[in-house]
Amino acid sequence: MITIEDILETNRMITVNKLDVRTITMGISLRDCAHPNLRDFCRNVYDKITRSAEFLVKTGEDIEAEYGVPIINKRISVTPIAIAAESCKTESYVPVAETLDRAAKEVGVNFIGGFSALVQKGYTPGDRILIESIPQALATTDLVCASINLASTKAGINMDCVRECGEVIKRTAELTRDRQAIGCAKLVIFANAPEDNPFMAGAFHGLSEPDKVINVGVSGPGVVKHALEDMKGANFTEIAETIKKTAFKITRVGQLVAQEASRRLGVPFGIIDLSLAPTPAVGDSVARILEEMGLEACGAPGTTAALALLNDAVKKGGLMASSHVGGLSGAFIPVSEDEGMIAAVKRGSLSIEKLEAMTCVCSVGLDMIAVSGDVSAATLSGIIADEAAIGVVNNKTTAVRLIPVPGAKVGDVVEYGGLLGYCPVVPVSTFSSEAFIARGGRIPAPVRSLTN
């Protein structure tokens, strides 16, 4: 039975501790839009997106007003364009990206994801066109997000694509240098990418998904931190239990919103992604949760253990609150989008090497990290390879979203605004991995992939 105390507690979570539903994301299949003529394909894509998502934003706003739950973003994900557009006779998918952008603006969503390629085991012609198109596509659009999945536990790591991705990131940065390389903030390189992730920039509508689906991403790091503030001196068993119970409550709010959006839109409910997604606002930080456990600063010895506890407890609590948990589900550690992470980088307690260690136990990876524009493509590729290896060997999702800002040096601060926040430029190793990256080929799948 729901008591008045439960209602008041949920109200406090929303009004004081910044609990929100971070996104309602409608996944839309574009497989039935295929056409050999690029213009006809783009028309089919535009028509299907605008028809399917016509009432998505209004529905989200109505639910927000009626239930008092903030819904920060309304988003769309589509079938990876490398697959959906492959029948087109064209040398570039930039016109497709521009079509996605127009459709997203027409229906009023914040972002649209799915300018993507899945190349963990190799390329098709469509994959090659898509990857080559990414820099220009992200430079000429506002709302389009791109992703590449280049590794999986079953397939290993496509090192040819790893090498290419470093160059793609550099070209994207150069083409958007007048906006502090913001194009790179809309590009994610994955290992083991989930097909139902509602969070940008890595969302795409997987091939095993229905024609349309509603996926919801919840947040609430401020709620978790608040719950731990009254636990001075508690042991880790008690802390884990508290986080589990708090994650349960957070996820139930998301479940309510997801089911209501699904019913009103007449679109099947897919999953709840119960990730703790921070923002640059004070009081909405994953780093501050870790510090509440007793760390002087995020990045201090013990940080990885604290994050492992947090991630595990969030998953356990969320699983009890929803029968369909998916996406990334855990704790995000983006630098520019987390006030505590930004402060830790400024204090010198948090380095890119420590962030890499933390990605072994968080829900994603090296996320929204600004680096000097002088960092070479090979170094970016080396960082991608390391993250992919963590994901492949540990059978988890890892990702890289690095932003080499042209003209920026270590210590400079780059500002993006909104949920993308701001970030001090982080130092990276100056030792070269060029000869390593130049080898290409494929790093084989690990022994743990042989599970049949």
Image: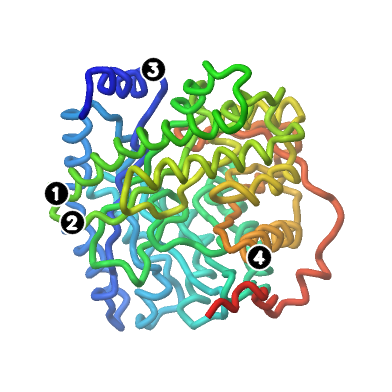
Of the residues shown, which amino acid type is indicated by label 3? Val
- Secondary structure of the residue carrying tag 4 is helix
- The residue to which callout 3 is attached is 16
Of the residues shown, which amino acid type is indicated by label 2? Val
In space, the residues marked 3 and 4 are separated at their CA atoms by: 40 Å
- Secondary structure of the residue carrying tag 1 is helix
Which of pointers 2 and 4 lies earlier in the amino acid sequence? Answer: 2
Which of pointers 3 and 1 lies earlier in the amino acid sequence? Answer: 3
Where is residue 383? Give x, y as percent. 71, 57
Of the residues shown, which amino acid type is indicated by label 4? Val
The image quadrant where one finds the N terminus is top left
Describe residue 93's horizontal placement relative to residue 292 as left or right: left
Which of the 4 quarters of the picture holds residue 171? bottom right
Label for residue 263?
A: 1
Where is residue 49? Give x, y as percent. 23, 60
- The residue to which callout 2 is attached is 267
CB of mark 2 within 8 Å of CB of mark 3? no
**Residue found 20% across the figure and 64% down from its top:** 48
- The residue to which callout 4 is attached is 393
Other residues around mark 4 within 10 Å, as few (<14) / some (14–19) / many (≥20): some
In space, the residues marked 2 and 3 are separated at their CA atoms by: 32 Å
Other residues around mark 1 within 10 Å, as few (<14) / some (14–19) / many (≥20): few
In space, the residues marked 1 and 4 are separated at their CA atoms by: 40 Å
Determine if residue 40 is in view.
no
Which of pointers 2 and 3 lies earlier in the amino acid sequence? Answer: 3
Give whichever of 290, 76 is nearer the camera.
Answer: 290
- Secondary structure of the residue carrying tag 2 is loop
